[in-house]
Image: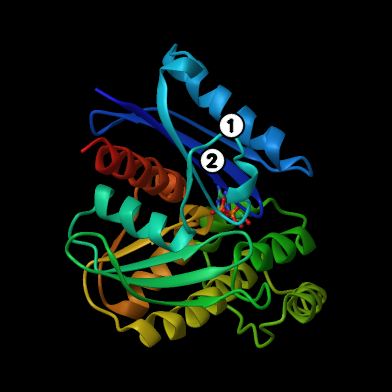
Amino acid sequence: MTLVAGVDIGSTTAKCVLIENGKILGKSLAPVGVELVKDAERSLEQALAETGRGRGEVAVVTGTGYGRFKVTFGQYTVTEIGCHAKGAHFLFPATRVVLDIGGQDTKAIKINEKGEVVDFAMNDKCAAGTGRFLDVCAGALGLDVSEIGSLSLGARHPVKVTNTCTVFAESEVSSYVSRGKEAKDILAGLNASVVSRSLSLMQRVGIEPEVTFTGGVSRNEGVVRTLGYRLKLPVNVSPLSQYVGAIGAALHGLERKEATAT
Ligand code: ADP
């Protein structure tokens, strides 16, 4: 039995999972600050604390995410694309398209039956349609991003958000507020805008079932439902959806270790 760790240092959060024998034993999630090496170390320590296991018992640590090179104590680094592919395949083996919406980018990844990347498309030039877009717009409504999903489900007359640029969308939100629009209708409009941008990325790689939604924005039930409705397909979302990159990193590390041992 080999205990392996995946550490995903994203633009917004640090995630770590510990896997042994195909089971997730521990995990951690915390916001990132400016000292990413420390954030990475802390995320591993916090995940270990959940398991009661010691650092010396971890056979391999693999870093991923935009800050993967800050996982300086790890043995391997793997791109987020490869990790989301592998992590989504682990949780939902019939996945063919992964949609990952994180804090600062959105990726559509086409994968094969082994969880290998076949194609991908990503939006990383600006924050439009990403978690940051929702964070800023929720802030303009005086809300936390974690409130968006449930509130938006009560929308009766969703507004149309025409600006994709985060800065202009924030002013558009304020203008809807001053015109008396309800927060739930504005939030539903924001979610729909995120879904529209995601669909165009997914179309670039080709949409086919099953679709698995990963990254922090998949915790927004409003985006999940709108995505399923627009796709006319069920969308897989796990309670571990924000950890999928870290899960994939841990599994990649295990594979590499096993490959070098043979
Ligand atoms: P990264 O890997 O780039 O740090 P994550 O995959 O951790 O990004 O996603 C972060 C984003 O997830 C945040 O910007 C926020 O919009 C969204 N998010 C996080 N928690 C929640 C939640 N409880 N409900 C809705 N959205 C959330």
Callouts 2 and 1 close, C-beta under 8 Å: yes
Count neighbours of disc 2 (C-alpha within 10 A) and say few if under 14, some if 14 to 19, many if 20 or more: many
Residue 161 lies, with reference to residue 149, above or below; the image says below
Residue 52 lies, with reference to residue 42, above or below; the image says above
Secondary-structure class at tag 1 = helix
The kind of residue tagged 2 is: Lys
Residue behind mark 1: 43
The kind of residue tagged 1 is: Ser
Q: Nearer the viewer, residue 226 or 200?
A: 200
Q: Does the Cβ of the disc 2 residue fall within 8 Å of ligand 1?
A: yes
Residue 86 lies, with reference to residue 231, above or below; the image says above
Could one spot residue 239 in this view of the protein? Answer: no
Q: Quadrant of the C terminus?
A: top left
Q: What residue appears at the point 39 percent right and 43 percent down from the top-left corner?
A: 247
Give percent across and percent down for residue 26.
42, 26
Secondary-structure class at tag 2 = strand
Q: What residue appears at the point 52 percent right and 37 percent down from the top-left corner?
A: 74
Q: What residue appears at the point 74 percent right and 74 percent down from the top-left corner?
A: 173
Q: Quadrant of the N terminus?
A: top left
Locate residue 18 relative to residue 91 in the image: left or right. Answer: right
Give percent across and percent down for residue 54.
47, 13
Q: Nearer the viewer, residue 154 or 10?
A: 10
